[in-house]
Image (spheres, rainbow, N blue to C red):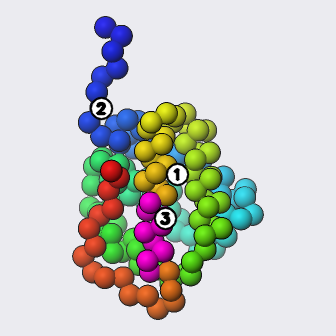
């Protein structure tokens, strides 16, 4: 009695899809409010970006394979972000907004640290194909959280 049940995945520890969707929506809103982070969210963003990102993160965090079953693979994700140049200041502003979003939706402690560490690592990984005309290799393995 009084013990917290063990959770088998970061996905479950975060609270599942609805909580991750709340996180992506909050993150998006925070990015739009920050002049440094707003740029990628102000132009031609997919109408369901938040839901697609929530599907991707859910899968990355050990949940159901929502993204790869319905939208694409890791190569597709990297192609979406490729060729935009290195933009460390923008990345850092977006990462700070992600950390704030975690807090605002009530995700704290080790779970928040793990989710933020994954998001930072995934952001840095995208820089591999930042140069204009970069070719993302086919068949990249899905980028799961550790």
Q: Relative to 14, is 105 on the left or the right?
A: right
Q: CA distance from mark 2 to mark 1?
A: 22 Å
The secondary structure type at the circle numbered 2 is loop
Q: Is residue 125 magenta?
A: yes
Label annotation for residue 24:
1
Q: Are marks 1 and 3 in contact (CB under 8 Å)?
A: no
Mark 1 and mark 3: Cα distance apart in space: 15 Å
State whether residue 130 is above or below residue 62: below
Residue 89: percent from left, percent from top: 65, 67
Image location (x, y in percent) of residue 32: 68, 59
Q: Is residue 137 visible?
A: yes
Q: Would you say the magenta stretch is mainly helix, strand or loop?
A: helix
Q: Are marks 2 and 3 in contact (CB under 8 Å)?
A: no
> Based on the displayed image, in which of its 4 quarters is residue 39 positioned?
bottom right
Residue under label 3, please give it: 123
Can you identify the residue that label 2 sits on?
Answer: 7
Q: Is residue 64 left or right of residue 58?
A: left
Up the image or down, 122 lies above or below 59; here it is below
What SS does tag 1 mark?
helix
What is the quadrant of the N terminus in the image? top left
Residue for point 49% across, 64% down: 123
Q: Secondary structure at mark 3?
A: helix
Q: Which residues are magenta?
A: 121-129
Inter-mark Cα distance, 2 to 3: 26 Å
């Amino acid at each position: 009695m009084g013990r917290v049940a063990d959770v088998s995945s970061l996905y479950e520890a975060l609270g599942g899809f609805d909580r991750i969707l709340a996180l992506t929506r909050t993150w998006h809103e925070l990015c739009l409010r920050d002049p440094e982070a707003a740029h990628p969210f102000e132009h031609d963003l997919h109408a369901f970006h938040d839901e697609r990102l929530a599907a991707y993160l859910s899968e990355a965090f050990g949940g159901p394979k929502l993204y790869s079953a319905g939208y694409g693979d890791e190569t597709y994700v990297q192609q979406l972000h490729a060729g935009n140049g290195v933009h460390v200041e923008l990345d850092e502003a977006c990462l700070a907004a992600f950390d704030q979003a975690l807090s605002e939706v009530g995700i704290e402690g080790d779970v928040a640290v793990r989710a933020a560490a994954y998001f930072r690592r995934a952001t840095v990984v995208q820089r591999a194909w930042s140069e204009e005309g970069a070719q993302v290799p086919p068949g990249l393995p899905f980028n799961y959280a550790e």
